[in-house]
Amino acid sequence: MSDDARTAARPSDSTAQDSARAEPPRDHLTVTAHSLTLGDGTTLRYTATTGTHVLSEEPAGDEYARATPYAEVFAVSYLVDSPDDAPERPVVFAFNGGPGASTVWLHMGLLGPRRAVSGDVGDLTAPPYATVDNLETILRDADLVCLDAMTTGHSRPAPGAKPDRLHGFTADRDLIASFIVDWLTRHDRWHSPKYLAGESYGTTRGAAIAARLMDRYYVAVNGIALISPVLDFGTIRFDDGNDRPYVHYLPTYAAIAHAHGKHPGRSLEQVVDEAEAFAEEEYPHLLAQGLRLGEDERREAAERIGTLIGVDPAWVDRADLRPEHLAFLAQLLRDERRVTGRIDGRFSAPAGDANAERMETDPSIDALAPAYTASINHYLRHELGHSSDVVYEIMSGRVHPWSYKEFEGRSVEVGTDLARTLRKVPGLRVFVAHGYHDAATPFHASEHVLAHLAIPREDYEQRIRIAYYEAGHMMYCHEPSRIALAEHLGEFVRQV
């Protein structure tokens, strides 16, 4: 055969590429068996299924068209071995937020059977870090599915699909709701009690997903765990003309000031109670006065605020009685040439520029993230048998700009979704976890939203439980808070 004939007989590179593109994507899953001995001597035997699940969709407007793949969602599913005659175990679907954060935080910090050891303020773990058994895992009470939103973890669009169409409120909500419905069918778990657990933007996501499941599929969930919640962005975004964030952040500022010794001789509860009373009764009136506020009243207000949040009243006055959160975190320890953490205000680090208006980086994230990065990458490959050349995106900026087009001209909020779902599903309960030192999603903001849900008073009192922890956004890095939160979540799933 001539060289020309050989060349003609061999498929061209473009033909091979076209063939690869034509082949539909498939699930890539690894199944492994494990056991965990708890503190009381009980042994949990469970199966972990790790990898990407292909989701397909029917083209819009074409009722009978064949569904085509559009996403490969990465998840780790933990199913505890149970006798055949045992009642269906609850199943918890967990996700983090960002947008752009993978679910490594809830997975390896709180819920899963193995956890990262990061240490805490004053006792941080040094690299290369470690992964240990999580004796407080939610697997004691429920099966668990940890899934990653699009372009986080190993989740990616299907070949040929564009990722940006899934980088937005509604598309993200619909993607994860579809995954849950698909998972329930594949695993024959339609009669299992169903729970959602979200953290940070994952709580925004969680409330929206619960509503989507009910509105679109008539799937009723039994409970939603909202960890470090944000339910109305108008309560935390410092936009011009919006005074709400200043009011809602003030109790958190006071708690962080207490953590750094600015309220000697007083308990955290005393400081927070005083700050909340001021934020709810006096502060809104003072801000509403604007230029009508007299000089003496303004001076007294600056003094009161400065004392509560541990900074110079003159700085508060120059801020027009409105300290923005990143500015506060740069100001609180300025005399020590240190900046304070946003995710967890108990953390601090040396300031690169002691005169900078805002911190250049968040010392709490810098302190915690490396341990989680090392743990998840080692755990997936060496314990769950999952190997991929795709980078596991712990936190990715590639999801931005994130689309909120559905909220044009108004605040991004899911309080209406949560209230509607509570009205539709009488058995639904909500558990809310707040960190006192969380300067990303301040506790007073979600307290306000929850207290204004369009539900009967008795539902608010009986179906919503709120708990507080002496730590920040990822309160589980604080060992007493981690143990307490794990027990509270177990009670929630058991409906105690």
Image (cartoon, helix red, strand yellow):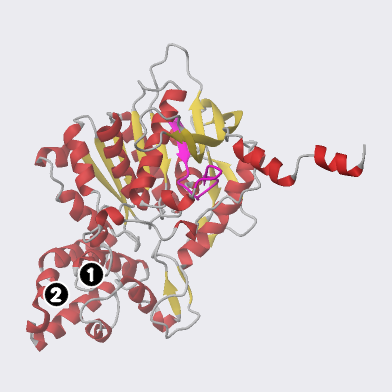
Residue drawn at the location 18% of the way across and 30% of the way down = 426
For the point 52% across and 56% down, the residue is: 119
Secondary structure of the residue carrying numbered label 1? helix
- Single out the residue that lies furthest toward the top: 85
Which residue does the image show at 14% across and 71% down from the upper left? 283
* Position in image of residue 360 (x %, y %): 46, 75
Which residue in the protein does label 2 denote? Answer: 287
Instruction: Name the kind of residue labelled 2 in the image.
Output: Leu
Residue 487 in sight in this render:
no
Location of residue 146 in the rendering, given as x and y in whole percent from the top left corner: 47, 39
Residue 371 position in % (x across, y down): 57, 54
Q: Report which quarter residue 244 is drawn in.
A: bottom left
Amino acid of disc 1: Tyr
Q: Residue at x 30, y 79 (%)?
A: 311
Q: Which residue is mark 1?
A: 246
- Local packing at callout 1 (Cα closer than 10 Å; few below 14, some 14-19, many 20+) is many
As drawn, 461 above or below 372: above
Part of the protein shown in magenta: 139-161
Question: Is residue 403 something one can see in this rendering?
Answer: yes
